[in-house]
Image: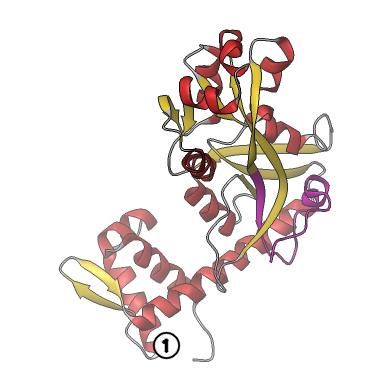
Amino acid sequence: MANLNLHHLRLFRATAREGTLTAAARALNISQSAISTQIKALEADLGHDLFERRGRNLVLTEAGRIALDYAEQIFRAADQLAATFRAVGEQRKVLRIGAQATLSRNFQLQFLAPLVGRDDVEVVLRSGTQAGLLRALEALRIDVLLTNQMPARDAASPYLVHRLAEQPVSLVGARSRLVLAAQGLAHLLAHAPLILPTPETALRAGFDAMLERMGIVPRIAAEADDMAMLRLLARADAGVAVIPPIVVRDELGTGLLYELAQLPEIVEPFFAVTIARTFPNPLLKEVLGGAAPEA
């Protein structure tokens, strides 16, 4: 195998992703027979079967899984090469940011502050799920992911995680809740209807553990996985929200909401996730500042 045919490898990758020749042919707009012939040629070059048939589906063999891993690396490097040299000729620099859909908008604006108002910079901001944005990061469709959840990592993970900040977490509510707040944190937690992050969030886990230590059974008025919704529910006086003050900075400034009490030892971390690149986007240094990747 003197030369690996990258066209064959691209067809193999598409088939592995789609699971059937029919779906791969539809996605690539070529015939099934052409894909089948060229995958067989790739298998002959590699000396191993890459798929085994199970009903109508094609399932990767062990050799196929290894080949797919290398194929992903090869085409990721090719995309990186193309993106790097496309950017060389661009007068305006572009930073593509993925932000977890539930992340505080105020924090996102704070992160972007070094670039706001610059005529030579374009910022492309996309929101989505953490899993989807991590895939976009690996495929080089974004340069950085902003999140409040540390991504799962092992020795094979490509992620570099930069801890940007930790925000205190408070109980925030409307003016009508000040009377309860005046009687102390424990009284407020035990008697106020609470607006909480959903149970799968790290913030909620820390809050539940604090209640357990204090022996308090909460009155839950609402739960939401979106900081913007927690903010709106607090504004509507649906209860007292467990929320970082940065999320409701404007409302606190105007007196629409009040910081009723800080929650000791509970913080919300904010992370920027990147991957190691031979040619990293130079704008990353400006927004990351001195934040070094965590070990």
Q: Where does the image place residue 24, in percent across and percent down from the top left?
A: 33, 60
Q: Residues within 10 Å of mark 1 (few under 14, many from 20)?
A: some
Instruction: Kindly identify the residue that appears in the image at 31 percent across and 54 percent down.
Output: 26
- The picture places residue 276, in percent across and down from the top left corner, at 69, 65
Residue sitting farthest toward the top: 176
User: Is residue 42 in the magenta section?
Assistant: no
In the figure, 55 relative to 179: above or below?
below
Left or right side of 265 for 278: right
Position of residue 191 in the picture relative to residue 248 (left or right): left
Q: Nearer the viewer, residue 206 or 269?
A: 206
Dividing the picture into quarters, in which one does residue 216 lie? top left
Q: Is residue 49 left or right of residue 243?
A: left
Left or right of 200 on screen, residue 22: left
Task: Residue 145: give x, y in percent of width and height.
Answer: 62, 48
In the rendered image, the vertical position of residue 271 relative to residue 73, given as above or below: above
The residue at which mark 1 appears reads as: 46
Residue placed most toward the observer, 176 or 215: 215
The reply to whether residue 90 is visible in this rendering is yes
Q: In the picture shown, does residue 215 fall above or below 74?
A: above
Residue at (53, 23) in percent of width and height = 187
Give x and y (percent) for residue 291: 78, 53
Amino acid, disc 1 = Leu
Secondary structure under tag 1 reads helix
| Outermost residue toward the left in this view | 55
Q: Which residues are magenta?
A: 269-295
Instruction: Pick the quarter of the image with the C terminus.
Output: bottom right
